[in-house]
Amino acid sequence: MPRGGAPKRPKDLRRTLRTFFAYLGHAKFSLLVVAVLVTASGAANLVGTYMIKPIVNALAVRDVGAFMRVNRST
């Protein structure tokens, strides 16, 4: 890595990735599982935020009736 700068990009990306995955050996499956779980966690966070939005909006306008309707439907 050059001093004070970003590392240089590999000239042959496929070869570099092949070497990287060769170093991983039996951990390739674990890396795939972690990638899937991180993606699922991010999606769950987005969905959770989306589902909370109607409740927060109802409380912001002090509409208790809408708040109760949202709670009964869940």
Image (tube, rainbow, N blue to C red):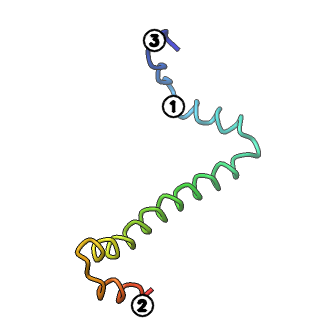
- Farthest residue in the right direction? 26
Q: Please tell me whether residue 43 is drawn above or below residue 5 in the rendered image.
A: below
Q: Which is more toward the observer, 48 or 37? A: 48
- The label nearer to you, 1 versus 3, is 3
Report, in whole angstroms, how far the alpha carbon at label 1 lies from the one at label 3.
23 Å
Query: Earlier along the polypeptide chain: callout 2 or callout 3?
Result: 3
Q: Quadrant of residue 59?
A: bottom left
Which amino acid type is shown beneath numbered disc 3?
Answer: Gly
The residue at which mark 2 appears reads as 72
- The label nearer to you, 2 versus 3, is 2
Q: Please tell me whether residue 56 is drawn above or below residue 35 in the rendered image.
A: below
Report, in whole angstroms, how far the alpha carbon at label 2 lies from the one at label 1.
54 Å
The residue at which mark 1 appears reads as 13
| 49 relative position to 44: left or right | left
- The residue at 50%/24% (across/down) is 10
Which amino acid type is shown beneath numbered disc 1?
Answer: Leu
Near mark 1 (Cα within 10 A), the count class, few <14, some 14-19 or many ≥20, is few
Q: Secondary structure at mark 1?
A: helix
Mark seen at residue 4: 3
Horizontal and vertical percent for residue 32? 63, 52
Which amino acid type is shown beneath numbered disc 2?
Answer: Arg
| 14 relative position to 22: left or right | left
Horizontal and vertical percent for residue 55? 35, 76
Q: Secondary structure at mark 2?
A: helix
- The residue at 36%/87% (across/down) is 68
Report, in whole angstroms, how far the alpha carbon at label 2 lies from the one at label 3.
58 Å
Q: Quadrant of residue 56?
A: bottom left
Horizontal and vertical percent for residue 33? 65, 56
Query: Earlier along the polypeptide chain: callout 1 or callout 3?
Result: 3
Q: Please tell me whether residue 68 is drawn above or below residue 52 in the rendered image.
A: below
